[in-house]
Amino acid sequence: MPASSALRRGLAVVAALPLLTLAACGYGSQAKDDGTAKVAAGAKKIDGLDSVKIGYFGNLTHGTALVGMQKGFFQKALGATRAAPAVFNAGPSEIEALNSGSIDIGWIGPSPAINGYTKSAGKNLRIIGGSASGGVKLVVDPDKIKSLKDVKGKRIATPQLGNTQDVAFLNWAADQGWKVDPQSGKGDVTVVRSDNKVTPDAYKAGSVDGAWVPEPTASKLVAEGGKVLLDEASLWPDEKFVITNIIVRQEFLEKHPKVVEAVLKGSVETNKWINADPDAAKAAANKQLEEDSGKALPADVLDPAWKSIRFTDDPLASTLGTEAEHAVKAGLLEKPDLKGIYDLAPLNKVLKAEGEPAVDDAGLGAK
């Protein structure tokens, strides 16, 4: 077999790993749903639909979903159609849930969205809105790493193979001139794929020297004595890059466009409230985290984490294309055709009704 063909086949296998191997490991879990979401008196179901199943992570970078659930913005927009939550720990399991119809709409990072879109040949999901930018940092042990060049030769954790932060760190390492095997994580710097829940313990035990992670994990590491060596936002124009998108199952979008618009209306209203009163929003997000996981974040973690995230309706589509290029360069993805990954018509309809400017798909809208 020619070397080029072997390489293409190898990259295709690696690209599939985040969606296959990790999903099989059982990451992610359905949230408790006690059916107590408040429905206004006299409210009616949209299109006669009983519920819409909404997925998100227990991360502050998914703050729109956390706050929207906690403050009832989604439920208000949905009338008597119940907003049914499902909480996941990782993108592959959420994509799997979307593919199977276990959820209808989800908040998710760009890499899982790209992988999910390309794996289904563009037939199962659409990105329908933005949610957040920023909130990702390289945090290190200051006794072992004092400068960026000291990262070479160290053990750095990322959440999982092929996830958004994994791709970002591999791309950054390549920019330093370092070589790392994308699948094993071995090379001039060792990449340790570690669930965000256990990374702080791994750091305390000394099994990793730092981590490229989203909030609140980054601030948890700082609370354990870590130092922020690099904020990923500093690597992007205007310090903006997509960290959380809103995706929908295409079949659901086609059958229930009014329900999708209602969820987007709830998202827009949530982001407006978050940006108008960030302290109250921060408290609401933390309360939802406590309800979902049984544990709230302490102030020394919550406060700095929340400050580093920007909540926006704009999907920052041009940065999605750049992140896909990073995955290709890292050897985790064959060059994808992302034309059609966005359908921003429902969001722009909502934004127009709210008197807000339209957002752009950077040429990656419907074919």
Image: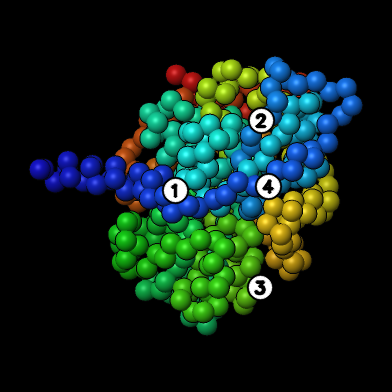
Q: Quadrant of residue 311?
A: top right
The answer to whether 27 is drawn above or below residue 64 in the figure is: below
Which of the image's four quarters has the C terminus?
top left
- Callout 1 secondary element: helix
- Whole-angstrom CA distance, mark 1 to mark 3, is 30 Å
**Residue 216, how many percent across, how many down?**
64, 60
Callout 4: helix, strand or loop? loop
Q: Residue 340 appears at what percent x and percent y?
A: 46, 25
Disc 3/disc 4 C-alpha distance (Å): 29 Å
Quadrant of the rendered image containing residue 6:
top left
Point 66% across, 30% down: residue: 52
Tell us which disc is closer to us: 3 or 4: 4
For marks 2 and 3, give the one nearer the viewer. Answer: 2
Please tell me which residue lies in front, 44 or 117: 44
> Label 4: few (<14), some or many (≥20) within 10 Å?
few
Q: Which residue is mark 1?
A: 23
Question: In the drawing, does residue 140 fall left or right of residue 154?
Answer: right
What residue would you read off at disc 4?
32
Up-down relation of residue 185 to residue 122 (above or below): below
Which residue is depicted at the point 51% across and 73% down?
202
**Which residue corresponds to the image point at 53% horizontal and 22% vertical from the top-left?**
251
- Kindly identify the amino acid type of the residue bearing the numbered disc 1: Ala
Callout 1 crowding tier (Cα within 10 Å): few <14, some 14–19, many ≥20: some
Residue under numbered circle 3: 223
